[in-house]
Amino acid sequence: MSESRVTLSIENHIATVTLNRPDKYNGLDLETLTALVKTARALKKNRDVRVVILRGAGKAFCAGLDFGTVTKTPMKMLLAFTKFGVRKTNLFQKACWAWRQLPVPVIAELHGYCYGGGLQLALAADFRVAAPDCELSVMEIKWGLIPDMTGTVTLRELVPLDVAKELAMTGRRFDAREAKQLNLVTRVADDPRAESQALAHALLERSPDAISATKALFQRTWNQSEDQAFHEESRLQFKLLRGKNQGEAMAANFKKRAPDFRNRQRDY
């Protein structure tokens, strides 16, 4: 599958999604946002996919919203900001949040610029692997705006309130090592592509059902009460105990062999 702004390749259960506007440092225009949503929607239906790597072509992951292009069509931009019916997200938000909603782990592979909407896209992933020279910024304040592409949720999961305010109010740029200290990236690696692949293959060694259930468990319970968290633990564990992949994990451990997992059996 390929979109003009986003490419998708799937090999050995790993989907690689590439932002494909290298001449614009993968700046986000409306076509790119739409392509991101469509690609995520297709991946959500494909149980052969067990891990997603999200990356950018060329010299950057994503330099943020392409204001020069988006503002040329004000009516389309207004429609993209609009939420229709019972939808919780507009197009700008959905382009990021769709990756959080995938039932499989998403790894953002970061290099070059990771600004504004690009940073919010990265924060919607489960893991972020950054090159040392990656430069990050909550840059919306530069344009007189706020981070409104799900950053209010993803930032609060990772940093204290005062840190989120400082980054969003100053829009200052910082490198990957500071981002790691701030808890905004998971790993810093000289070769983020190789590191992302290594993490993806480590995840493939585990039951795809257990991986999916773990993602669902933490996302639903991280800020919930103990009662709600314990209930969700029991509910998901009961589903896993009835599954073939859990049986395969047990058998592989007892027989001291590599497991041979099936594709994920259900949604969690």
Image (cartoon, rainbow, N blue to C red):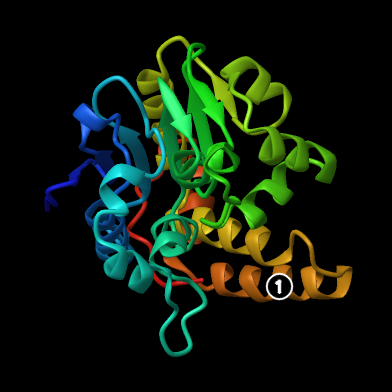
Which residue is drawn at the image coordinates 86% and 70% (left, top)? 225
- How many numbered circles are shown? 1
Residue at the extreme right = 226
In the image, is residue 185 above or below residue 238? above
Question: Is residue 153 toward the left or the right of residue 114 in the image?
Answer: right
Secondary structure of the residue carrying numbered label 1: helix
Of residues 69 and 168, which is closer to you in this image?
69
Question: Is residue 47 toward the left or the right of residue 139 in the image?
Answer: left
Few, some or many residues within 10 Å of mark 1 (<14, 14–19, 20+):
some
Q: Is residue 107 visible?
A: yes
Which residue is drawn at the image coordinates 47% and 62% (left, top)? 93
Question: Is residue 243 toward the left or the right of residue 184 in the image?
Answer: left
Residue 154 point in image, percent of width and height = 63, 51
Residue 43 point in image, percent of width and height = 29, 59
In the image, is residue 88 above or below residue 114? below
Q: Which image quadrant for residue 22?
A: top left
Q: Is residue 66 visible?
A: no
Of residues 109 and 85, which is closer to you in this image?
85
Q: Which image quadrant for residue 142?
A: top right
In the image, is residue 138 above or below residue 187? below
Residue 157 point in image, percent of width and height = 71, 49
Of residues 266 and 21, which is closer to you in this image?
21
Q: Which residue type carries mark 1?
A: Glu
Which residue is drawn at the image coordinates 27% and 39% (left, top)? 19
Task: Name the residue beneath numbered marker 1.
Answer: 232
